[in-house]
Amino acid sequence: MRFLVLAGLFFLPAFSISLEAAEWTEFLGPRGDGISEVTSLPVKWAESENIVWKTPVPGVGWSSPVVAANRVYLTTAVPTGDEADKRHSLRAVCIDAGTGAIIWDTEVFHHEPNETVEFHQKNSHASPTPILEGDNLYVHFGSHGTACLTTAGKIVWTTKELKYAPQHGNGGSPAIAGELLIICCDGKDIQYVAGLRKDSGKLAWKTDRDTKPARGFSFCTPTIIEVNGEQQAICPGSSAVFAYEPGTGKEIWRVDYGDGYSVVPRPQYANGLVYVCSGFGDEQVFAIDPTGRGNVTSTHVKWSTKKLTPKSPSFLLTGPHLFMVSDSGIASCLNAMTGEHIWQERLGGNFSASPFYAAGRVYFQSETGTTTVVEATGEYRELAKNQIGDGMTRTFASFAVVDDDILLRSESHLYRIGR
């Protein structure tokens, strides 16, 4: 350990920036696709090997870390009463990326006596990942509130305008589109998508989902894409995925998927197609041509599959391949253009965290601290299997990257993993 702190035929969309030194500013990285272009990330580690630092994080939260300017940010929920009370202080935390020391820890919201605070045993009150832009940190706690802080920990604004009845707690993270935060609000009572102004938190638009699902709750993070020079906010929910104009909330297209609900995986855009999961109930992966208008269920779905569909982890697209892992731990590689399954392999354990890609490798993290690293090719080849904790340590948050190292969040600690 360096030191320990105890406390191609198919191409991804073209971008003008290099990600070699890019900061990890939102859920699944700077482009929201789970891809890092850092070539020197570690492949092997253990609790006593290649751990740069390990820092206790107060409370419980499954938000993934975000990184900028040698600072790591995440959210957490700290109990404020006894176990029967269930109320929490909802907080944002800043950690020094070099040492693991906590720089600041700011309460953003706290549960009021009349608030509904139930959540699923696999969830937390701080599951949405923050998003960084310049000197601003945007944090979201579902129906319990959304806020903007400076990177120095000062609250700029807060809002509790996004009201709905949560089921199993909160989950989906915000996405940025121009001057707005785009947020999916899918409760058991009402379902809608909203645009909040980044400078004030005021509601710019609110569009009701045009569906009547039997189970309305979902937890998806929007993906902002550009198609023929126009932006689209891809927002899956129960029963259907919608594309909206990010500036106005006007619906562009939709694809229906029946009884799918509790949708979690973030949509991806590559090879000119949008890839989405339909959640629980009617589990499918869809590849959709996003150039249509209106209901394009029968015209613009290029392929779909029900085989080994993930319900919690997002999937990963690189070159001609789509990589995914089912919640029950079966990893698979598909032809991204046809949906044909190329290989599948049981990794062991259950999975909630999303995989990520770097230097020709895919990193799959189980719910109990095991990371399986495989080659990102059309043939399964395992490179390493790494364990942190005691084999029972919960790890539901997705990875982040800082410089040449990996950030991994467990239920009690944040690890920086190096060489």
Image: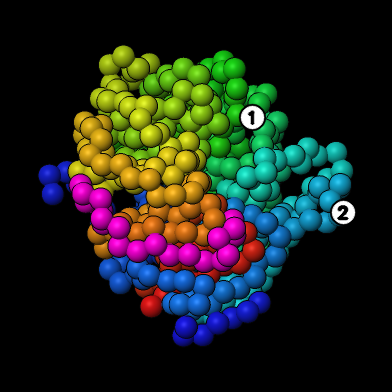
From the top left corner, tell me how far across and down residue 338 is, in percent. 21, 31
Q: Where is residue 334 in the image (x, y as percent from the top left)?
A: 26, 38
Q: Residue drawn 67% across and 24% down?
A: 189
Task: Quote the CA–CA distance across marks 2 and 1.
Answer: 27 Å
Q: Is residue 212 magenta?
A: no
Crowd around label 2: few <14 · some 14–19 · many ≥20 (10 Å) = few
The quarter of the image holding the C terminus is bottom left
**Front one among 276 and 254:** 276
Residue 23 shows in the view? yes
Which amino acid lies under the numbered mark 2 shown in the image of this protein? Asp
* Vertical comparison of 416 with 326: above or below: below
Determine whether 371 is above or below 249 in the image.
below
Provide residue 347's location: percent of width, then percent of height.
Answer: 40, 50
> What residue is rendered at 74% in x and 52% in y?
109
Location of mark 1 (residue): 187
Residues under numbered marks 2 and 1 in contact, where contact means CB atoms less than 8 Å apart: no
Q: Residue furthest bottom?
A: 2
Q: Which residue is drawn at 70% across and 65% down?
A: 58
Instruction: Specify whether residue 390 is painted magenta.
Output: yes
**Image quadrant of residue 150?**
bottom right
Q: Name the residue under label 2.
A: 82
Magenta highlight: main SS: loop
Element on which disc 2 rests: loop
Task: Determine which of the numbered discs, if any, sits on residue 177 in the image.
Answer: none
